[in-house]
Image (tube, rainbow, N blue to C red):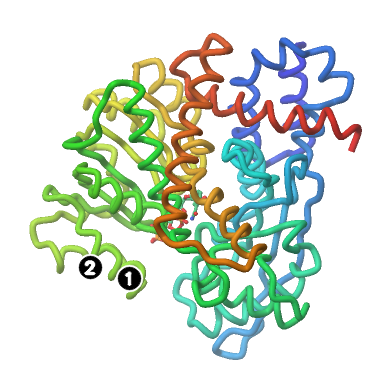
Amino acid sequence: MSYVDDVYAKVVAKNPAEPEFHQAVKEFLETVRPVIDKHEEEYRKVALLERLTEPERQIRFRVPWVDDKGQVQVNTGYRVQFNSAIGPYKGGLRFHPSVYFGIIKFLGFEQIFKNSLTGLPIGGGKGGSDFDPKGKSDREVMAFCQSFMTELYRHIGKDTDVPAGDIGVGGREIGFLYGQYKRITGLYEGVLTGKGLSYGGSLARTEATGYGLIYFTQELMKINGIDVAGKTAVVSGAGNVAIYAIQKAQELGMKVLTCSDSTGWVYDPDGIDVKALKEIKEVNRARLTEYKKYRPNSEYHEGRGVWTIKADFAFPCATQNELNLDDAKTLVANGVTAVCEGANMPTTLDATNYLKEHGVIFGPAKAANAGGVATSALEMSQNSERLSWTFEEVDAKLKQIMINIVHNIDAAAKEYGKAGDYAAGANIAGFKKVADAMMSQGIV
Ligand code: NDP
C-alpha cells in the first residue's frame, strides 16, 4: 500500500465515527500525493504523516452554566491543539449544536495549512462547544462564555494558543470570553483575536474573511484573464463571512443575487441590500424572512436553493458540505465560471471533483478564506507592539496577503504538473512549509 493510503486507513481506524475529519484528511492526502511520493522513504521513516494527522493535544471539558429559569445546563467544550510547527496554535471557536470532536478536528487540520499559506508564523488549532447561542439571552451567553473560559484559560496564552471567532462566536462572545480570561489571569494580553476596538481589536478584522475571499477571487480571475466587474454571483450564508463578501463583491462591481440562513434563502434580482442584511442579522439577530420588508421585489424561500440561481460566481459562505454533487451539476449546467469557498469545506468531495472536471475554476477554502486568520495574526502583531494600525493599513496588508496566496498556490500547482488545480496547489504549498519545519524540529 502507498504511504498515503496506509496513513488514511490508519486515520479512519483510529478516529472512528468522525466522517468530517476523514473527509478533510482524504482531500488533503489525495492532492499532496505527488509531494509525498517524491519523499516517501524519508517521510515514512519519521512517520511525518502519522504525526501530522494526530493532534498534538485534544482537550474536552465540562461547561456547566445556569439559564434564565435557574436551571443548570451542561455543555461540552473542546480545544484541539493540532500543530505548532510554525507558530502558536491559532484558530477559531465554534458554538453550534453540531459540534463534536469530528468537526473540531476537521477544522483544526485544515487550519494548519491555511495558516501556513498566509506566510505568517501561526500553527493550527480549533475549538468550540455544542452550546447553541440562538435564542439565548445576553446574560445566558455571558454565563456560558464565563464558564467555558474558566476551564479554557489554563490551556491558552498569547504565545501558546490564540483562539478567535467562528460560527456562533462573534464580537459579543469574544468580549465575554476575554473579560473572564483577564479576570482569572490578571493579564491584559492578546490571547484572543476578533476583540472589540476599545480593548485591543484590529480594524478590518470583522470584514477580513469576506473581503479576503473577494480579493482572492479578483486575483484568481485576473490570472485567468477574467474581469470580475459586471459579473453576477450567488452567495450562501448571512453571517460574518457572507455579509462582508457581498459588500466587497458589490463594491468591485459584481451583482450578488442571493444569501441564506439556516432556515431559508433570499433571491434579490436587483442585488442584495447589504445595509438591510446587516440590520437584520447583526443588529436584530432575526431571520431572513424580514428581508422582504426592506426589498419588496425580492423572493424568500424556505429550505435551501441558492445554487439554482444562474450566476458567474458561486461563494459558499455558510457551513461544511452545503454544496453537494447535485448542486455542482446545476451550477455547471448554468455555466458558472468559478466557485470560491468562504466557509470551511462547504463543497463535498464529489462536487469538487465534478466542478474541476467540468472546467470550473475552484478556489479552495484554506486559501480563499485565509484572510480572516491572516488579519487575526495582524491583530496579534498590533497587540504585541501595543499599537493600532489604520483600517487602510490593515486592509492593504490583507489584500497583499490574498494576492500572494493566489500566486503561491498557482506556482505550487504548476511545479507538480497540476496547473489550474488550485486545491492541489493550496495543499502542496501549505504542506511544504509545515513539513520542512517538522523535519527540522526532530521527533516531537
Ligand atoms: P456566522 O455564525 O456569522 O454565520 C454562519 C451563517 O451560516 C449564518 O447565516 C447561519 O445561519 C448559516 N449556517 C450555519 N450553520 C448552518 C447550517 N448547518 N445550515 C445552513 N446554514 C447554516 O459564521 P461565519 O460567517 O463566521 O462562518 C461561516 C463559515 O466560514 C464557517 O464555515 C466558518 O468556519 C468559516 N470561516 C469563518 C471565518 C471568520 O473569520 N468568521 C474565517 C474562516 C472561515 P443562521 O443565521 O440561521 O445562524
Which residue in the structure is indicated by mark 1? 286
Where residue 109 appears, as percent x and y from the top left, is: 66, 40
Where residue 384 appears, as percent x and y from the top left, is: 67, 63
Task: Looking at the picture, tell me which residue is in the foreground, 345 or 209.
Answer: 209
The amino acid type found where label 1 is placed reads: Ala
Q: Which mark is residue 199?
A: none
Q: Quadrant of the C terminus?
A: top right
In which quadrant of the rendered view does residue 426 lie? top right
* Element under disc 2: helix
Where residue 166 appears, as percent x and y from the top left, is: 53, 57
Task: Looking at the picture, tell me which residue is in the foreground, 172 or 117.
Answer: 117
* Element under disc 1: loop
The residue that appears at 31% across and 51% down in the rendered structure is 303
Which residue in the structure is indicated by mark 2? 290
The residue that appears at 63% across and 43% down in the rendered structure is 120
In which quadrant of the rendered view does residue 212 lie? top left
